[in-house]
Image: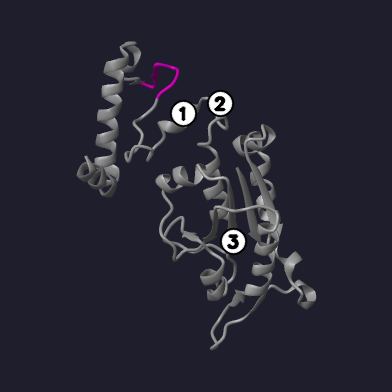
C-alpha cells in the first residue's frame, strides 16, 4: 500500500513516520508513506497556497489550484483508490473504516489548514472525508497521521503478531477486555485466577464477558449498536 499525504507543513509528519511500527512497515516494503509539500505546487509568489475568504470573515483558505496541481501530478504516476480530506466536519473515522481502507492499494490524504480548503476542491477532487472527532486542530497533519497509523497497523505483516490487531478494541464492535502481565500480584492486587488456569475456553468466555461489561459501562452507545446488531 502507498499513502501520499499533501501538507502545508510536511515536517510535522517526518518524525511520526520514522519510528516504531510505521517505520518497520516501510522498511519491510509492505507500505510506503510519502509526504508532499503543497507549496511546491503553487505558481504564486512567496510560495503562497492560501488566500482570504470570499465574502469576508476571519481566517485564510487553501486555494484549489495548488491542490489540483499536486493531485493531478500524483495521479499521472499511478491510480488512486481514494482521495481523502481530513476535516472536522466529516463523518467520524472508525475501526471499520480503517479495515476497509487497509484492503485498498493507493490513497491520497489531504491535510486542511487555516479555515480549510476551497469548497470546489472538495467537490472536484475529494472522494472521501473523515474526522477523528468533534474538535478542531491547527491542521490536518495529526488526523492524517492517526488515520494512516490505523490503516497500516492492520495490514498483514506490519505487526509481528498479526492476531494482536484483531483483538484490539472496536474490531468486533466492543471494547477490549482488561489485560494483565507479570507479576501475578502487586500491592495486594491479583491477576484474575481464570487467566492463570490455562483453560483456553474458559479464558475466552471470561474475556468476552469482560468486553461486554466494559463496553456497556464505558461506551453504552457502542454496546447498544452491538446488541442491536446481534
Which image quarter holds the C terminus? top left
Q: Residues within 10 Å of mark 3 (few under 14, many from 20)?
A: many
Per the model, the C-alpha gap separating discs 1 and 2 is 9 Å
Q: Position of residue 183 (x, y in %)?
A: 44, 17
Image point (29%, 43%), residue name: 218
| Labelled pair 1, 3 in contact (Cβ < 8 Å) | no
Q: Residues within 10 Å of mark 2 (few under 14, many from 20)?
A: few
Image: 83 above or below 96: below
Residue 164, label in figure: 1
Residue marked by disc 3? 111
Q: Position of residue 62 (x, y in %)?
A: 62, 72
Image: 188 above or below 36: above
Q: Position of residue 38 (x, y in %)?
A: 70, 64
Per the model, the C-alpha gap separating discs 1 and 3 is 30 Å
Q: Work out whether mark 1 precedes mark 3 in sequence or the reverse, and give the earlier one.
A: 3
The quadrant in which residue 77 appears is bottom right
The quadrant in which residue 144 appears is bottom right
Q: Position of residue 86 (x, y in %)?
A: 52, 60
Per the model, the C-alpha gap separating discs 3 and 2 is 30 Å
Query: Is 185 a magenta residue?
Result: yes
Task: Pick the residue in front: 107 or 190.
Answer: 107
Q: Secondary structure at mark 1?
A: helix
Most extreme residue toward the right is 45
Question: Magenta span covers which residues?
Answer: 180-188
Magenta: predominant secondary structure element? loop
Position of 72 compared to 99: left or right?
Answer: right
Residue marked by disc 2? 160
Amino acid at each position: 500500500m502507498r499513502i501520499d499525504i499533501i501538507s502545508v507543513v510536511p515536517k510535522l509528519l517526518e518524525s511520526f513516520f520514522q519510528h516504531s511500527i510505521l517505520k518497520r512497515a516501510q522498511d519491510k516494503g509492505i507500505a510506503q508513506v510519502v509526504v508532499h509539500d503543497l507549496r511546491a505546487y503553487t505558481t504564486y509568489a512567496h510560495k503562497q497556497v492560501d488566500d482570504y475568504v470570499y465574502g469576508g470573515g476571519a481566517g485564510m483558505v487553501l486555494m484549489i489550484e495548488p491542490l489540483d496541481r499536486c493531485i493531478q501530478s500524483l495521479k499521472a504516476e499511478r491510480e488512486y483508490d481514494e482521495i481523502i480530506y481530513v476535516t472536522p466536519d466529516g463523518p467520524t473515522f472508525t475501526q471499520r473504516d480503517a479495515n476497509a481502507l487497509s484492503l485498498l492499494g493507493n490513497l491520497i490524504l489531504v491535510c486542511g489548514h487555516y479555515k480549510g480548503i476551497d469548497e470546489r476542491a472538495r467537490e472536484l477532487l475529494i472522494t472521501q472525508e473523515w474526522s477523528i472527532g468533534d474538535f478542531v486542530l491547527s491542521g490536518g497533519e495529526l488526523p492524517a497521521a492517526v488515520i494512516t497509523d490505523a490503516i497500516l497497523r492492520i495490514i498483514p505483516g506490519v505487526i509481528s503478531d498479526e492476531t494482536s490487531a484483531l483483538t484490539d478494541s472496536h474490531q468486533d464492535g466492543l471494547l477490549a477486555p482488561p489485560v494483565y502481565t507479570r507479576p501475578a500480584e502487586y500491592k495486594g492486587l491479583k491477576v484474575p485466577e481464570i487467566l492463570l488456569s490455562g483453560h483456553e475456553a474458559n479464558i475466552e468466555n471470561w474475556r468476552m464477558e469482560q468486553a461486554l461489561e466494559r463496553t456497556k459501562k464505558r461506551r453504552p452507545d457502542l454496546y447498544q449498536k452491538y446488541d442491536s446488531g446481534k
